[in-house]
Image (cartoon, grey):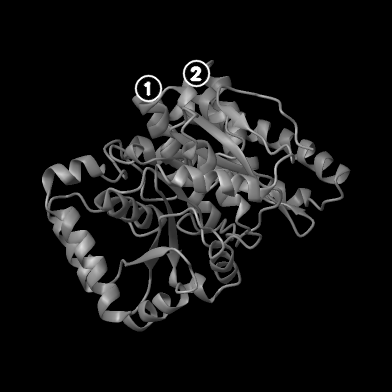
Amino acid sequence: MADFYQNGIITTLHNLRQRDLSDMEAELRKFSKKQSMTLVLPSLYSELEGEALPNIVKELSHVDYLDEIVIGLDQATEAQYKEALSFFKPLNQNFKVLWNDGPRLQELDQRLAEKNLAPKELGKGRNVWYCFGYVLAKDTAKAVALHDCDILTYDRSLLARLLYPVANPNFNYKFCKGFYARVASGKMHGRVTRLLVTPLIRALKKVYGQNDYLDYIDSFRYPLAGEFAFRTEVITDLRIPSDWGLEIGVLSELNRNYANNRLCQADIADVYDHKHQELSAEDTAKGLSKMSVDICKTLYRKLATNGVVFNAETFRAIKATYFRIALDFVETYYNDAEMNGLHLDIHAEEAAIEMFAENVLGAGQDFLENPMETPFIASWNRVNSALPELSNEFINAVDADMKEYG
């Protein structure tokens, strides 16, 4: 049985294994009569050919409390877009597939680019941003959930537990972050959270002392989880990174916009496995190496906006402090793995830490050399102010694509 301990400053909603899924789904159906719910799925076309997404669609076909599912489709040709429309037909809900590479949405992207409002980097952040814009344009959903399309261990209880805190009208939460144990196939995963984010946060606290923002991030059990839900009004002035800093960036925006008692985290899965990124220690433009650089820079930017001053000397101190704390964590994780009959490769763990330590410093140097870099995408409030007609055009473009190719 899970514990019910509350640590940190963010409310944790546990899974105490006392409630059937059918009971929770019945309550969500009741909530849906007063406020509609939408699910956002950012997807690559390649994920339609993988192991995870077919099962996700099968599980979602049994969910009857959603008003709509919005699928952002990246890296798809015309023929692949047609295939995607057929692929998602087993869903029993209304669904829309945003063909992000299609001529109609590319035209809208170009119009945004002319006003310097379009995302500048391809990737999940851009896909999610356009999905959010579509949800706002429709203006029907009161609660929105988002999860990835590569979850190999997916079942629909994940969605129910993720949405419940923001869908329940008796709760006061604007945002819910999912968390879970990254354990699968006899191994302990989640290297970037375990070996980078947590020890880096502790190192920053040691170098700079008590900091409200660092306490906030440290309160989330899995800050890099790609699953979250929110009341729709949260989206309007959300400025998110277009790179791998998406999850930390979203948490940072929520910290800026809302009191801590409006935010929560929920235990949404007993086991969780998805595709794993390569370490790519030799190339900071790929894999976990790029991810670690983007995450570090997102944290540094947020701290700088809160008045924290960085220089070359402090980044060297941060690297050294991080390295020592991270190495100490390896023993902790090894003992935890041993007690639970899991395999943990100490050599691989320490090799990852060595790479992360270099990137902690490298990201700091890049931050100092490019102080005006702003990878954040404009908020939809700003977009709608600059191009008030875009919302209707967005809806019409998606509908036209689905009518023409469906």
- What residue is shown with label 2? 211
Q: Position of residue 288 (x, y in %)?
A: 55, 53
Left or right, 199 with reference to 249: right
Please report contact status of discs 1 and 2: CB closer than 8 Å, yes or no: yes
Q: Nearer the viewer, residue 222 or 403?
A: 403
Q: Which residue is located at x 81 percent, y 53 percent?
A: 343
Residue 229 location in percent, x, y? 47, 43
Horizontally, is 387 left or right of 139 in the view? left
Of the residues under marks 1 and 2, which one precedes in the sequence? 2
Comparing 102 with 167, the one in front is: 167
The quadrant in which the N terminus is found is top right
For image coordinates 54% across by 21% down, the residue present is 207
Tell me if I can see residue 297 in this picture.
Answer: no
The residue sitting at 60% across, 27% down in the picture is 202
The type of residue carrying mark 2 is Asn
What distance separates the C-alpha of mark 1 from that of mark 2? Answer: 10 Å
Query: Residue type at mark 1?
Result: Asn
Spot occupied by residue 23 in the image (x, y as percentages of width and height): 64, 46
Q: Quadrant of the C terminus?
A: bottom left
Q: Which residue is mark 1?
A: 306
Residue 9 in the image: state x and y as whole percent: 56, 22
